[in-house]
Image (cartoon, rainbow, N blue to C red):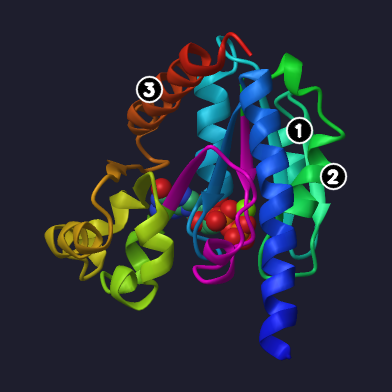
Amino acid sequence: MKIKILKSVLEQNDNQAQINRKKFKQTGTLGVNVMGSPGCGKTTLIEEIVKSMKDKYRIGVIEGDYAGTVDAEKLSSYGIPVVQLDVSSCHLNADFVGSALNHMSLDELDIVLIENVGNLICPAEFDIGDLLKLVLYSVPEGDDKPIKYPLMFSQADAVVLTKIDLLPHFEFNKKKVKESISRLNKKFELFEFSKKDPTSVKLVANYLESNFRKLVRSYGDL
Ligand SMILES: Nc1nc2c(ncn2[C@@H]2O[C@H](COP(=O)(O)OP(=O)(O)OP(=O)(O)O)[C@@H](O)[C@H]2O)c(=O)[nH]1
Ligand SMILES: [Mg+2]
């Protein structure tokens, strides 16, 4: 009986995720699910992406937080639309994101960055209807995380190694990390980011830009 209930929760989530995904495609908006453990640097990277892309692209943010509004307040200061979701849960689900989308004019946005709740397990289990999954993985977490949290790394379109400036201070073998993700995931791209090096966001921004262009080419006629 328990299994049936869980199945219906996931089915319901998947149905709403399809609705969200269709909305993103119809409006030509790249919905990006930004995931990673608590404190891995999600808000910091989003902030740098916004700074780097906001003059050329119309960017919105959905902030999924367990509690508090600090991240949403920080990002609102860039004059972009930000919707805060108080989820009181370890992950975002498609319903939460669907309700946030009802408060955004997707027709007027090119990219929506969705900061998921800091967690390497639950967000990987709930489809939110995004078109791209960025998984952030910070150097201080240690180089064994893909082995311990395989679902998250297997789903990533791109993995961003964050806090790369801290590499000299931690035992973190980049080659080992790349190999363990490659065993789980055949298609991921890998980036390195440090807030101490503002140019390091450029490659991530270029990646988002090329995915946005691909989306517009594929669904421009809808
Ligand atoms: N050294 C260093 N610190 C960083 C870097 N990126 C973020 N930090 C710091 O790491 C801490 C957490 O960063 P956030 O961007 O708030 O992380 P988050 O993933 O959004 O955290 P939650 O929303 O709480 O899950 C802050 O003190 C940042 O200043 C980086 O590239 N290098
Ligand atoms: Mg944050």
- The amino acid type of the residue labelled 2 equals Ser
Would you name the residue on which mark 1 appears?
Answer: 76
In the rendered image, residue 78, in percent from the top left (x then y), is placed at: 70, 26
Q: Is residue 118 magenta?
A: yes
Residue 40 is at least partly visible in this image: yes
* Left or right of 218 in this view: 18: right
Of mark 3 and mark 2, the one earlier in the sequence is 2
Helix, strand, or loop for circle 2?
A: helix
Task: Give the image quarter of residue 5.
Answer: bottom right
- Compared with residue 44, is residue 79 higher up or lower down, i.e. above or below? above
Is 93 placed above or below 16 here?
A: below
Mark before the other along the chain sequence, 2 or 1: 1
Q: How far apart in space, not on screen, are marks 3 and 2 (Cα)?
A: 29 Å
- Whether ligand 1 has any atom under 8 Å from the Cβ at mark 3 is answered as no
Tell me which corner region of the image, top left, top right, bottom left or bottom right, holds residue 2: bottom right
Work out which quarter of the rendered image holds the C terminus and state it: top right
Nearest the viewer among 147 and 144 is 147
Q: Of marks 1 and 3, which one's residue comes earlier in the chain?
A: 1
The residue to which callout 2 is attached is 99
Q: How far across and how far down the image is residue 184, in percent?
A: 27, 62
Q: Which residues are magenta?
A: 112-135
- Graded by Cα atoms within 10 Å as few (under 14), some (14 to 19) or many (20 or more), the crowding at tag 2 reads few
Please state the horizontal and vertical placement of residue 25, each as a whole percent of the image.
61, 26
User: Is residue 69 in view?
Assistant: no
Q: Magenta segment: does it hold 157?
A: no
Cα separation, mark 1 vs mark 3, equals 23 Å
Please tell me whether mark 1 or mark 3 is closer to you in this view: 3
Outermost residue toward the bottom? 1
Check disc 3 and report the residue beneath it.
206
